[in-house]
Image (tube, rainbow, N blue to C red):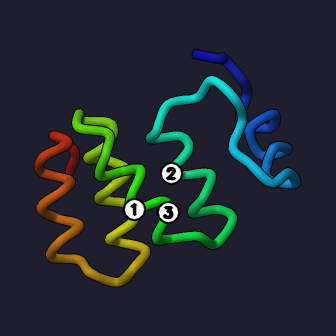
């Protein structure tokens, strides 16, 4: 897995694909930042751990579904 700063990650948003070597959760955040919620959601669902659940929760919060977001925040052990 690559290590990069927030600024380096943000710079990748000018490209057409998420940075190579990052996990699904970060790929999901990349696609969300690019406006592709559906692909972000698909990737978050595939990441079957607390990090994936946390991103999944965030995506449902952004979507405007607080009930579903709350479920995923609990799965991620986040407030």
Q: Do the residues labelled 1 and 3 touch (CB within 8 Å)?
A: yes
Q: Mark 2 points at which residue?
A: 28
Look at the numbered discs 3 and 2 and tell me whether their residues touch, using CB distance below 8 Å: yes
Going 81% across and 33% down the picture, which residue do you hit?
8
Question: Residue 71 sits in which quadrant?
Answer: bottom left
Tell which of 11 and 20 is nearer to you. Answer: 20
Does residue 34 sit above or below 19 in this rendering?
A: below
Which mark, residue 39?
3
The span from disc 2 to disc 1 (Cα, nearest Å) is 7 Å
Q: Can you say whether 16 is above or below 70 in the image? A: above
How much space separates mark 1 and mark 3, taking CA atoms?
Answer: 5 Å
Indicate the position of residue 58 as horizontal and vertical percent values. Answer: 37, 60
Q: Does 58 sit left or right of 70 as displayed? A: right
Question: Could you give the CA–CA distance between mark 3 and mark 2, rounded to whole angstroms?
Answer: 7 Å
Q: Looking at the picture, how far across and down is residue 61, in whole percent?
A: 34, 71
**Label placed on residue 53:** none
Which structural element holds mark 3?
helix
What residue is shown with label 1? Answer: 41
Disc nearer the start of the sequence (2/1): 2
């Amino acid at each position: 897995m690559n290590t990069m700063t927030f600024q380096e990650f943000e710079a990748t948003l000018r490209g057409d694909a998420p940075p190579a070597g990052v996990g699904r959760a970060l790929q999901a955040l990349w696609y969300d930042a690019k406006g592709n919620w559906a692909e972000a959601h698909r990737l978050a669902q595939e990441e079957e751990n607390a990090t994936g659940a946390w991103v999944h929760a965030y995506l449902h919060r952004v979507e405007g579904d607080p009930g579903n977001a709350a479920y995923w925040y609990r799965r991620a052990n986040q407030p």
